[in-house]
């Protein structure tokens, strides 16, 4: 089964576009719990509410045996829920091949995030894994994103921003149908433009919650004509909803609220009781 | 001691601009030797010939206990030789902070490579480590580099390529003097342009050897007015010079040849006997 089918299956089963970012930061977690137990408890409490989970490598590779913990957490996620390896890698062809093999074959992620700056041969080893998803960073959610991503180019008397060119190339490269884009919720206008120009592409939308992106705008601007095609990712707002013993139930409550708010903003999708 | 002083010390002591990439690929290594023994033997055989070593994370994170192997190898390098963590990371501020902490504090690298696509707040956590070096990807050595890096912008009636804008920003952000640029040896014209416009910036130059970059052009176009300021990095050409038992001595021979060829191409620097 390819990534897109697996994702759509989870979206339908859980009636959800919500992705939870499992980014364990010992400084923010409840005291005296280890990373594996923490993430497993969150997964157990929320796996009927999400369309995907996302694990950012940065939160694992610095811990003792951190990548092994990441592998254990990834394996603990029910097999019908796709898991995105948020690695944002970008390297020359033969090195990108190593990264793709690690993310997809060693850690068994269903999808990966990839930085487009190095161009096609840095992306190709990822998309060659035809059954996995590849999300190219397009317009990211952080304050500095505009520094380069919004630089204007003129081509055939028309102006394009760098992130628009990335999206155009991504669509040209998408021969296997497994490329998506990352567009942050903090940029509603850019998200709207990308959705208008690329009506069929899957968009991973981080930046709601702690980063301040407007959830309603993210949903309205991000979904496709079937009111799907968008993965709304949130991490801190959900996994750190409580730092007490009830953290997993608090995460469930927060996840349900975001899931329902997303559904409320995509008319035609029945609300959950 | 800051990165630049440490680097200049090693350049002077070993009369060398050569950096060896310790990128262990079990498929290319001599049979029946583990990654740690392989890399340690290369370091022992070459540490009087280089100005730096560079470890690319891609070649470690997919191996069993690979990051632990990377840590052991990094620790085995003599303390007066700087070691670059070639991670090419780029993520939003709070996540970039985790990456920077891991690369500099956990693995104790003297410098890191960073992808500029996410802009200033993705770079800032790295440069805040004032005593470490930060190499921003500018014009990379791979075939796809031109896809985005060579896109033309017009500003004040003058045309700039994206990689030129990255270099201009890098110089503006270089308040602590610890930012350098990555410019591949496969692009002599671009390297020359960057050196002309940024006479004082340190440039990390990969792409000689297996990737086909012209060594003579890389040296002539890359060094600064003191015939330093450039780190010429080679990996496969040196570490896989032989796949037999003599691999370490073969690596030494290959490294000495590249070191001497580099010095031959920077007139004023006396050849080594």
Image: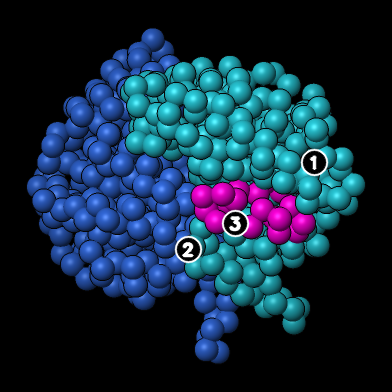
Chain colours: A cyan, B blue
Query: Residue B188: x percent and y percent?
Result: 44, 63
Q: To which residue does mark 1 refer?
A: A177
Q: Quadrant of residue B268?
A: bottom left
The residue drawn where x is 67% and y is 35% is: A256
Query: Residue B34: x percent and y percent?
Result: 35, 15
> Mark 1: few, some, or many residues within 10 Å (few <14, many ≥20)?
some
For marks 3 and 2, give the one nearer the viewer: 3
User: What's the magenta region?
Assistant: A202-222
Dot placed on the residue nearer the N-terminal end, 1 or 2: 2
What whole-number distance in Å separates the C-alpha atoms at marks 1 and 3?
28 Å
Q: To which residue does mark 2 refer?
A: A144
Q: Is residue B240 something one can see in this rendering?
A: no
Say left or right for B53 vs A38: left
For marks 1 and 2, give the one nearer the viewer: 2
What whole-number distance in Å separates the C-alpha atoms at marks 3 and 2?
15 Å
What secondary structure is marked by label 3?
A: loop
Q: Is residue B200 something one can see in this rendering?
A: yes
Q: To which residue does mark 3 refer?
A: A213
């Amino acid at each position: 089964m390819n990534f897109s089918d697996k994702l759509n299956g989870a979206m339908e089963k859980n009636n959800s576009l919500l992705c939870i970012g499992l980014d364990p930061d010992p400084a923010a977690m409840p005291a005296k719990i280890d990373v594996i137990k923490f993430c497993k408890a969150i997964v157990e409490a929320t796996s009927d509410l999400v369309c995907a989970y996302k694990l950012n490598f940065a939160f694992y590779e610095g811990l003792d045996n951190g990548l092994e913990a990441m592998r254990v957490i990834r394996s603990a996620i029910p097999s019908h829920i796709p898991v995105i390896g948020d690695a944002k890698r970008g390297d020359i062809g033969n090195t990108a091949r190593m990264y793709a093999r690690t993310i997809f074959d060693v850690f068994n992620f269903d999808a990966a995030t990839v930085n487009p700056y190095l161009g096609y041969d840095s992306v190709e080893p990822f998309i060659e894994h035809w059954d996995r998803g590849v999300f190219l960073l397009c317009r990211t959610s952080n304050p500095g994103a505009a520094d380069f991503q919004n630089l204007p180019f003129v081509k055939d008397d028309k102006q394009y921003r760098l992130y628009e060119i990335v999206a155009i190339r991504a669509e040209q490269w998408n021969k296997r149908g497994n490329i998506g884009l990352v567009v942050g919720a903090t940029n509603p206008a850019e998200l709207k433009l990308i959705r208008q120009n690329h009506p069929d592409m899957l968009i991973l939308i981080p930046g709601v919650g702690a980063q301040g992106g407007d959830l309603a705008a993210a949903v309205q601007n991000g979904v496709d004509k079937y009111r799907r095609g968008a993965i709304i990712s949130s991490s801190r707002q959900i996994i750190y909803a409580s730092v007490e013993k009830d953290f997993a139930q608090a995460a469930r409550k927060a996840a349900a609220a975001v899931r329902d708010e997303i559904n409320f903003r995509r008319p035609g999708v029945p609300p959950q009781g």
